[in-house]
Image (tube, rainbow, N blue to C red):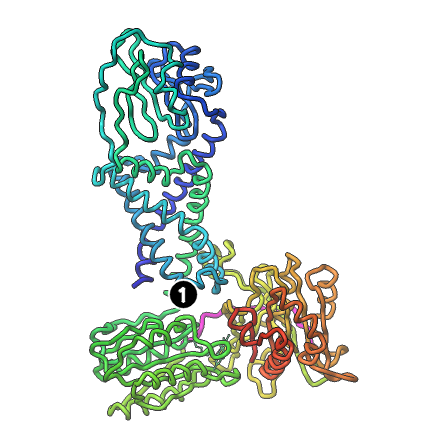
Amino acid sequence: MLRCLHSIPGLLAALVVSFMAITGAVLSLQPLVERVFAPAGNEMSVATLVDRVLAHQPQTESVVRSASGAVTAYVANLGIGIDPVTGASLGPVEHSALFTFFTELHRSLFLGDGGRVVAGVAAVAMVILATSGIALLINRMGGWKQLFATARGTLSQRLHVELARLAVICLLLSAMTGVYLTLVTFGIVSDGGQGFGFPPYGSGEMPAPIASLSALQEVPISDLRSIILPMADDTQDVFTVTTSAGTGYVDQASGALLDFTPNAPMQTLYEAIYTLHTGQGYWWLGVLLGLASLAVPVLMITGTLIWLRRRTSMPRMPCDAGWRKADTVILVGSESNTTWSFAATLRTALAKNGHAVHVAPMNGLRASYPSASRVLVLAATYGNGTAPANANRFIERLARFQGTGIDYAVLGFGDRKFRHFCAYAETVEHAMAAHGLKPITGFEPIDRQSAQAFGQWGRRLGAAMGETLELLHQPTQPKTQSYKLIERHDYGIEVQAPTVLLRFAIPAAPSWTQALKSRLGLDGFFAGDLAGIMPPTDPIPRYYSIASRSADGILEICVRKLRGGVCSDYLFGLRPGDSVEAFVRPNPDFRPDTGCQPLILIGAGAGVAPLVGFVRANSRHRPVYLFSGGRDPSSDFLYREELKAQLDAGRLTRLFAVFSRVMGGRYVQHRLLDEAEQLRSLVRQGARFMVCGSAAMGDGVRASLDNVLAPLDLSVERLQSAGRYAEDVY
Ligand SMILES: Cc1cc2nc3c(=O)[nH]c(=O)nc-3n(C[C@H](O)[C@H](O)[C@H](O)COP(=O)(O)O)c2cc1C
């Protein structure tokens, strides 16, 4: 609901809201420009000011002071700029054609009342977007206390979150005040203006010198809005003085204040809101509102990209029964789509058996399902047994779930090569049992999207439900492109650790939208992202960490040959000129943060590759320490020359290269213990760890670092929950 509220007005109003924001950003410069060009004044009284103006312009009929401090004298409707210190004329006042044009464009798009309605609707859309955006952000970051925690996700997601955090308060202010001003324009809300009142009669006696009029002496010019002078030969006429507090009338002979009408509260409110919307008189507010407005077009573009990505990553489920009517609810935890296609197969089979089925992401778990008798959860696992992004709030939501009469089954999707095989799905299984729900069948983990295992689970589920359930799943192939190998370097053959570094050319963008995205830098990949390679003999992709960025123009991976490894065998057989079918998958949780604290990179074998990519990208010369492990420096010292060059270039601060098959050989985890003192000092400076390599190495590194961190009353787990320890182990 919240997401719909955020995305639908966003998409519908994207262009108009961006247009209003850009024109608003131009107008927000007006207070600054006026401030720069307004002559400096001083704290004289209105009596002195008018006296000086009349000395230079005896025919003056009224004097107006703008919020920025500019003073204008009107003589027969002609505005003349006045130096408030001397009262001297600065020449006729010319209104900026640019600001006049943009004011009209911003208020009505030159379309009269129709345009004003459009502007008002855009302001309402902006209010909805800003408020739903704040709520979504609180949700996404895990509570308002985490609101300013490091944003994670793809480049567009991070840009969207970072900009929204900076701009949202100003945008909300502009939008709410904009809605109010539209309501005032159409007379729906009063601006509190009291209309023109007739001034009282003056004493009719001989006018005194203006500088001596006491009521005018008491008003400082900083309070003045305007003063209308009495008619030349009418001794009963009076001065009409409008200040920020109200309107008063001053006798031109005695200088007495004859009458004063304070501003009505609604008028004061109108003026305050007008100032908040325009920044008038407060140049810094104008600049702040303008900068926030400039964020809007970027938010609209990144928001649209996020929406497109979400839509394309969630397959369509036609004829969904809806959560109120469904007797069976399928909840899906998926990061990269494949689990959704299993859910689609399950849904079709259940619907064929006459069930009313509702399919939703796991985070979409509702507090209750009035017609449901079963919930089937299909959950993938990521990282250290963590949830995919669309399931990360599931356990929390489960606490509020009223599941009386609802049975459940959990099917895990994972890969046995990971240490925490299907661990998240297991966590879900335990949580559902602990919540008092009754299992239909036992927990089932599925390795590497096995269609056979899925079919068997379906038969067991069907039997428990008293029906036949045939799940014939056709795996959907990810969209791939052909990457041509341009270079390969072999290592480690002599030490029985054959490893190959492969560099592929990036294929041209297949469509204009893709080309535009790459041009805008929104579709690029970074070191640490994953290349999914499709071996010709198997429909399941294998993932390798990427060592390059798309900006480098190549896709670089490092592959260790595994005994019986289908994909590594295939990649080892490639020669320059050969092509592979591959795709890139973002891995936003394994990227260096944007801070400047030290970065400690630890890897062994092919795991060093993405870490070298991080070093290459360290153009800001952040302190980076690399612990790299191999067997023998003469055979498998990966990136040896390049790392030396990076040390010289200052992109790498220190390199600790460790080898296991030499005299006194050791592993990276041992070297960490040798450097315990320095590591502790770096941790005190806020260092972040990034570890890549085999699961065994990952375990060893954790154990060593727990020892290193103990004197600081810290552990790897605590660093990890603080976002200072990222792992990519396999
Ligand atoms: C970066 C990454 C990390 C993964 N981590 C794990 C893991 O810790 N345990 C596991 O069993 N599977 C892990 N997997 C495998 C996925 O869970 C598995 O491929 C799943 O079928 C993907 O489903 P999805 O495409 O719906 O996201 C990982 C896959 C990737 C790409």
Residue at 63 percent across and 70 percent down: it is 601
The image quadrant where one finds the N terminus is: bottom left
Q: Is residue 579 left or right of residue 624?
A: left
The residue shown at (23%, 19%) is 199
The quarter of the rendered structure image containing the C terminus is bottom right
Residue 430, placed above or below residue 550:
below
Within 8 Å of ligand 1, the CB of disc 1? no
Residue 91 image-quadrant placement = top left
Within 10 Å of disc 1 (Cα), the crowding (few <14, some 14-19, many 20+) is few
Q: Where's residue 417, x and y in %?
A: 53, 84
Which residue is label 1 attached to? Answer: 143
Residue 481 falls inside the magenta stretch: yes
Question: Residue extending furthest right?
Answer: 663
Q: Is residue 152 above or below residue 186?
A: below
Q: Residue at the location (71% across, 60% down)?
A: 650
Q: Nearer the viewer, residue 180 or 249?
A: 249
Query: Residue 649, position in %: x, y?
Result: 72, 59
In the image, what residue occupies the spot 24% across and 35% down? Answer: 192
Q: In this view of the protein, can residue 126 be seen by the observer?
A: yes
Q: Main secondary structure of the magenta part?
A: strand
**Residue 5, percent across and down?**
30, 59
Amino acid carrying label 1: it is Gly
Residue 308 is inside the magenta segment: no
Along the line of sight, the residue nearer the viewer: 487 or 460: 460
466 on left or right of 571: left
Q: Position of residue 676 (x, y in %)?
A: 69, 75
In magenta, the rendered stretch is: 476-490
